[in-house]
Image (spheres, rainbow, N blue to C red):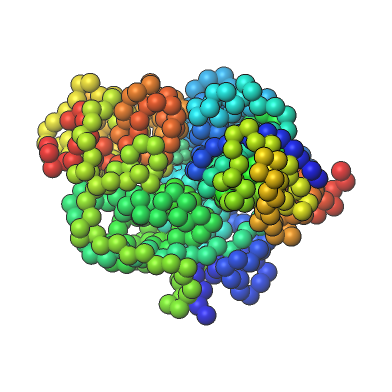
Amino acid sequence: MGKTLAEKIIAAHSDQAEVSAGDLVTVDVTVVMANDITAPIAIESFNAVGVGEVYNPDNIMLVPSHFAPNKDIKSAEQTRTLATFAEAQALTHRFQVGRAGIEHVVLPERGLVLPGDLVIGGDSHTCTYGAVGAFATGMGSTDVAVGMATGKTWLRVPETMKFVYNGKRQPWVYGKDMILRTIGEITVDGALYRSMEFTGEGIADLPMSDRLTMTNMVIEAGGKCGFMPFDEVAQAYVDARATRPYTPYFADDDAEYCSVHEFDLSTMEPQVACPYSPDNVHPISQIKPEKVDQVFIGSCTNGRFEDLAIVADILQRTGREFHPDVRVMIIPGSQAVYLDALRQGWIELFTLAGGAVSVSTCGPCLGGHMGVLAGDEVCVSTSNRNFRGRMGHRDARVFLANPAIAAASAIMGRLAHPDEL
Amino acid sequence: MKLEGKVWKYGDNIDTDVIIPARYLVTTDPKVLAAHCMEDLDESFAQNVQPGDIMVGGANFGCGSSREHAPISIKGAGVSCIVAESFARIFFRNAINIGLPILESAEAARDAQPGDSLSVDLTAGTITNARTGKTYQARPFPPFVLQIIEAGGLVPYTRHTLGIEI
Ligand code: SF4
């Protein structure tokens, strides 16, 4: 019987020749990641384990992203904990405000996570790195601590669901719409404990930024990890960045899948997840065009160069400005994205249109800072979660959408399709 | 090990943002986190929860972010164990890792009503509801996970396997 990507990569990091779904195995980890929220607890637990030194200073990445730049004294203490630990343990890779950004944008962009890697991260969206062919999964701080101390973790080999996208994407439809539709179909626990493999002509056609958007939201279906195929598009992206040798893996044709789900892109329109769940997904044409108070363009889901390019293109083509009543937060996912946008003239373009552009941070995505919502406010966001209270007040309502819908809504002052401009 | 407590019942897909909103993630202090546990969904919980009480949830309990602050806040509030139809993957690990007992039983979770009194036998994996008189068998843990639970969490377990004296 053939093997899935999860089975192959986990086996390669274990001391067994092969593993199958359901097996519990101990594996070597390639990269351990944590952020300013999860690392402080991980560092405490690491100290409690008592090994003294980290297993490998090259493979630990502590990224201040959520409340950085520090929003208050407490968060300042937290980010300082990361920096102090990184220095004391002589970690090879350092991530400082102004030079980094959101971990899930920064790590792939710098070639620090690669095909065939096994990555554990103290952040649920660690699954993002499946777009470059890594087995990557989110864990909590204690698992991260033990990963830092021993270079190992335990895993249950997941069953795999296969998702096939047929046909050609319609205008204004992106990876975001494909993954939202998928979560809408299988629901927020539809992939619980499972791996999600994405394939089909609709994936072959997809740029890396959209692939990263899709694997990013695997966790919103409860998934453990997700994978994009390692094809020419992926190889070009990886080869331009890889910091070390890597091993790509390919799923066998006769691999065992617990289910197969097919989608027809020729009839798919832009999708929106309505409050208060990422699986409350409807085509944009079927949603009441509600007035919006805030639009957030950014996050580890849609804060990449290509996402900002969509917004810039809409502004340039229509010559329009953002609606005067709407707060439009545009936050590049990394400082590299910020710099690229700056060089394109987009920072000026966004600012002249009335947008508020900031240094890279998770900020409003988790109701942290830089755009927290008041009660009853409505926000269109390119991020990945719209749970109650996620972006601020418990009564605020968040609609998740792609960057084109977000830009059109920011211009119209209400939920809008770009064709309306 | 036997636990007994009053039921706090919640629905499906209880996410970590409602268990402990991000605005409180600037601390790792269990007491501070416990004071805000569940507040966006049920303000009465943190005020009225008694040591030993049992939280009951539906499917996919603890979905969302990887914040260990979520099980820490529940444990910090005095909850002795969680019974749910199913747990989100990261929450499952986090709870085991910090030594907060969790049990998966769809039937026990569905039958339980707010205020019911449950007794839980962790060794046998059984849950008994005093009101209905019914006893339910929870899904057993894999032996490896049991070892972590028996050690009192992943940190003591790792110290043990590395041969570091406790
Ligand atoms: S951008 Fe949002 S979802 Fe992504 S890591 Fe930051 S807080 Fe989490």
x 51%, y 59%: residue:
A194
Residue A12 point in image, percent of width and height: 59, 68
Residue A302 image offset from top left, x and y in percent: 35, 43
Residue A343's spot in the image, x, y percent? Answer: 28, 37
The C terminus of chain B appears in which quarter of the rendering?
top right
Q: Residue at x 19, y 55 (%)?
A: A170
Residue A314 image-quadrant placement: top left
Q: Quadrant of the N terminus of chain B?
A: top right
Q: Nearer the viewer, residue A385 or A276?
A: A276
- Is residue A253 visible in the rendered image? The answer is yes
**Image x and y of residue A191, in percent:** 47, 56
Q: Quadrant of residue A304?
A: top left
Q: Is residue A33 visible?
A: no
Q: Quadrant of ligand 1?
A: top left
Q: Look at the picture and state if A199 lies above or below A52.
A: below
Rendered residue at 46%/27% (across/down): A368
Residue farthest to the right? B165
Give the residue drawn at x 50%, y 43%.
Answer: B12
- Left or right of A156? Residue A339 is left
The quadrant holding residue A37 is top right
